[in-house]
């Protein structure tokens, strides 16, 4: 396995602050997917300081932050059973990084938000996982057993490849519902714990 890229953004970390960083890259037209991205970052902040876990809008990409991050979490609204055109544009913009193996060995994870209960979110998670494999990244799934299938339940959509959330026709403050948002927070916390646990000794200085 390749060594995850060391983040120079965290070079001022103290001994008890893990020397890893996370970027949550998303596309959201109406704010629902953005709210999920924010919840993932909120969960990551249970393990890491604010400067080491951030959301990144595909319309305003901080490429330096992405290149230095240890984990890239990719998320898109589902359009016609696929990532959105804007998210695909972001994916295609990384082709030079694919060629130069810039992200090889980094961690990767994904989330998908859509209006349908299924909505073909699995196709999006598969699309993003294939993209991450093309880059030579190491995948982290969602190892969380569903607590049930009601609005307050964790992983109520029973997804394990990555995080699925569902938004109805309402404001992002109300939908996705509490179970989906709590699952996103759990996912962010789990992702941060995972990369901290597997942090190579060489990056701990
Ligand atoms: C062009 C278009 C295509 C869509 N296709 C799907 C789809 O295939 N499956 C689904 O469940 N929802 C679909 N939706 C609903 C979106 O997934 C939903 O509005 C979106 O996730 C909301 O997220 P956002 O607020 O972050 O933009 C579609 C919406 C639009 C506008």
Image: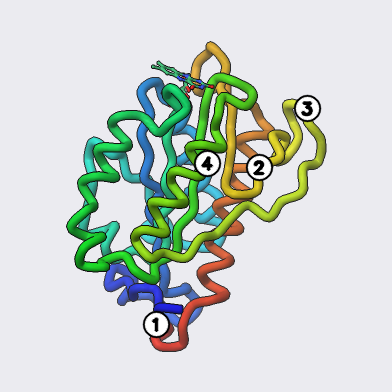
Q: Which residue is identified by label 1? A: 203
Disc 4 on helix, strand or loop?
helix
Q: Is residue 174 visible?
A: no
Q: Which residue is identified by label 4? A: 39
Vertical relation: 170 (above or below) 125:
above
Which of the two discs, 2 and 4, labels the residue nearer the N terminus? 4
Q: Image quadrant of residue 85?
A: top left
Identified at 40% across, 78% down, the residue is: 2
Q: Position of residue 123 (x, y in %)?
A: 51, 36
Q: Position of residue 162 (x, y in %)?
A: 57, 47
Which of the two discs, 1 and 2, labels the residue nearer the N terminus? 2
Disc 3 on helix, strand or loop?
loop
Query: Neighbour class for label 4 at 10 Å: few (<14), some, many (≥20)?
Result: many
Disc 2 on helix, strand or loop?
loop
Tag shown at residue 150: 3
Identified at 48% across, 33% down, the residue is: 35
Do tag 1 and tag 3 residues touch (Cβ < 8 Å)? Answer: no
Q: Residue furthest right?
A: 148
Q: Find the distance from the CA under tag 1 to the CA under tag 3.
A: 42 Å
Looking at the rendered image, the disc whose residue lies closer to the viewer, 3 or 4, is: 3
């Amino acid at each position: 396995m390749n060594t995850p890229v060391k983040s120079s953004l965290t070079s001022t970390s103290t001994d008890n602050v893990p020397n890893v960083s996370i970027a949550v890259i998303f596309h959201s037209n109406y704010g629902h997917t953005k709210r999920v991205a924010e919840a993932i970052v909120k969960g990551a902040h249970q393990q890491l300081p604010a400067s080491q876990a951030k959301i990144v809008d595909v319309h305003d990409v901080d490429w330096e932050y992405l290149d230095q991050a240890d984990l890239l979490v990719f998320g898109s609204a589902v359009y016609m059973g696929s990532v959105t055109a804007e998210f695909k544009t972001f994916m295609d913009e990384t082709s030079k990084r694919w060629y130069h193996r810039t992200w090889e060995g980094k961690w990767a994870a994904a989330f998908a938000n859509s209006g349908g209960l299924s909505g073909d979110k699995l196709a999006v998670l598969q699309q993003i996982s294939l993209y991450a494999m093309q880059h030579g990244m190491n995948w982290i799934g969602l190892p969380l057993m569903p607590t049930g299938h009601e609005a307050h339940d964790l992983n109520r959509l029973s997804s394990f490849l990555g995080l699925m959330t569902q938004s109805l026709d309402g404001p992002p403050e109300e939908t996705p519902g509490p179970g989906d948002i709590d699952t996103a927070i759990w996912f962010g916390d789990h992702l941060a714990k995972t990369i901290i646990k597997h942090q190579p000794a060489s990056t701990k200085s």
